[in-house]
Image: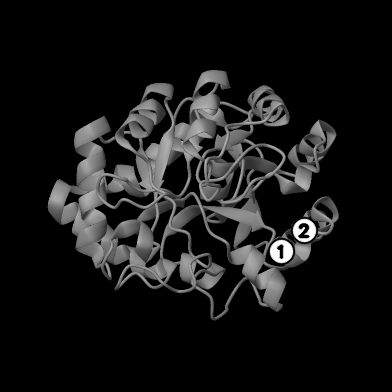
């Protein structure tokens, strides 16, 4: 079976919002769909839509409680990763490894103590902003936006101390370079593509891609159609991003951040849900061989996680 690490999905947010079920549902990702892969590692993001921003800290706690209720319900299939060794333990137990993340720093409500609380609850990665402005900085949707705020800089430093992964997807370019300057740890763009291939504001320019490589970070390829091509994309259009990124920064800093259940079902044609990624692995294998296909699908991110989660181990 194929191994898989996917650095971004919004499935838990969707299930919470629509009273769905983790194991089997009509969404793009479920435990059942993930069973197509050998002990996959899946990042689950908590994203707050407008209706939850009246009390972001409290509402995120509710989402986290819901997530753990679902994990406890289906504990035979999935467990949560707090430390690097948990991924190995779940592999032995033939379980999915769930890594929980925040998408946007709104739940912090301007308090470092809330960041510490979320870390204690198992959050291991945070996308600093969504597309809009928050207390940490400006997202890519802010016209003439600034970079990180003083609080945002404080958060990045604290995340480094905690070994919580900084995610720069959705952050504007000024904020990106602030992270590159401040962070003493590798950071990721969990679900962003190449701007040179598809000029969308959510994608990364060549200098940003090189900076992620230089810090030892990771880029997760996003399947959302507008980030892949200006026309309705097929798998070959996603391969163009892979080809460009590999030629620019090599094959070791690229993985997947598919954005399932966060893209209004507007995915690359043929990759409508997580179980369809087998087709993508096949096409990458045809183009670049088994070794690179496996690196993109799992090995690169596994190597990154082994070095950057709170507990380090040498190899997976």
Q: Position of residue 303 (x, y in %)?
A: 43, 33
x and y percentages locating residue 197 in the rendered image: 25, 49
- Label 2 neighbour load within 10 Å: few <14, some 14-19, many 20+: some
132 shown above or below 305: below
Farthest residue to the left: give it.
Answer: 287
Count of marks overlaid on the render:
2
**131 lies left or right of 189:** right
- Percent x, y of residue 30: 54, 70
* Residue in front for this viewpoint, 304 or 165: 165
Confirm or deny contact between disc 2 and disc 1 (CB under 8 A): yes
Looking at the rendered structure, the secondary structure element under dot 2 is: loop
The residue that label 2 is drawn on is: 53
Give the Cα distance between marks 2 and 1.
Answer: 5 Å
| In the displayed structure image, the side of residue 275 where residue 86 appears, left or right | right
Q: Front-most of 291 and 12?
A: 12
Name which quarter of the figure residue 111 lies in.
top right
Name the image quarter holding residue 227: bottom left
Q: Residue at x 37, y 45 (%)?
A: 255
Q: x, y (%) of residue 167?
A: 54, 39
The colouring scheme, among rainbow, by chain, secondary structure or one colour, is: one colour
């Amino acid at each position: 079976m194929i191994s898989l690490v996917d650095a971004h999905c919004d499935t838990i947010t969707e299930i919470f919002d629509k009273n769905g079920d983790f194991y089997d549902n009509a969404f793009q990702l479920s435990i059942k769909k993930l069973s197509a892969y050998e002990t996959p590692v899946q990042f689950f993001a908590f994203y707050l839509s407008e209706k939850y921003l009246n009390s972001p800290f409290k509402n995120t706690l509710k989402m986290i409680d819901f997530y753990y209720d679902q994990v406890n319900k289906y504990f035979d299939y999935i467990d949560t990763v707090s430390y690097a060794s948990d991924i190995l333990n779940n592999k032995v137990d033939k379980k999915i490894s769930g890594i929980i993340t925040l998408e946007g720093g709104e739940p912090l409500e301007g308090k470092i103590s809330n960041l510490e609380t979320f870390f204690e609850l198992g959050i291991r990665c945070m996308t600093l902003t969504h597309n809009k402005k928050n207390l940490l900085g400006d997202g890519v949707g802010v016209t003439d936006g600034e970079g990180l705020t003083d609080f945002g800089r404080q958060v990045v430093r604290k995340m480094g101390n905690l070994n919580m992964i900084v995610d720069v997807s959705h952050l504007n370019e000024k904020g990106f370079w602030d992270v590159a300057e401040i962070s003493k740890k590798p950071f990721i763009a969990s679900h962003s593509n190449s701007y040179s291939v598809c000029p969308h504001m959510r994608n990364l320019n060549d200098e940003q891609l090189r900076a992620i490589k230089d810090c030892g970070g990771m880029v997760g390829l996003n399947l959302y159609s507008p980030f892949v091509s200006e026309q309705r994309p097929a798998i070959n259009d996603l391969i163009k991003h892979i080809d460009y990124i590999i030629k620019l920064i090599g094959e070791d800093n690229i993985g997947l951040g598919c954005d399932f259940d966060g893209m209004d079902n507007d995915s690359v044609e043929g990759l409508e849900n997580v179980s369809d990624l087998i087709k993508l692995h096949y096409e990458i294998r045809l183009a670049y061989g088994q070794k690179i296909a496996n690196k993109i699908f799992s090995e690169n991110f596994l190597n990154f996680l082994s070095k950057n989660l709170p507990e380090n181990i040498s190899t997976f």
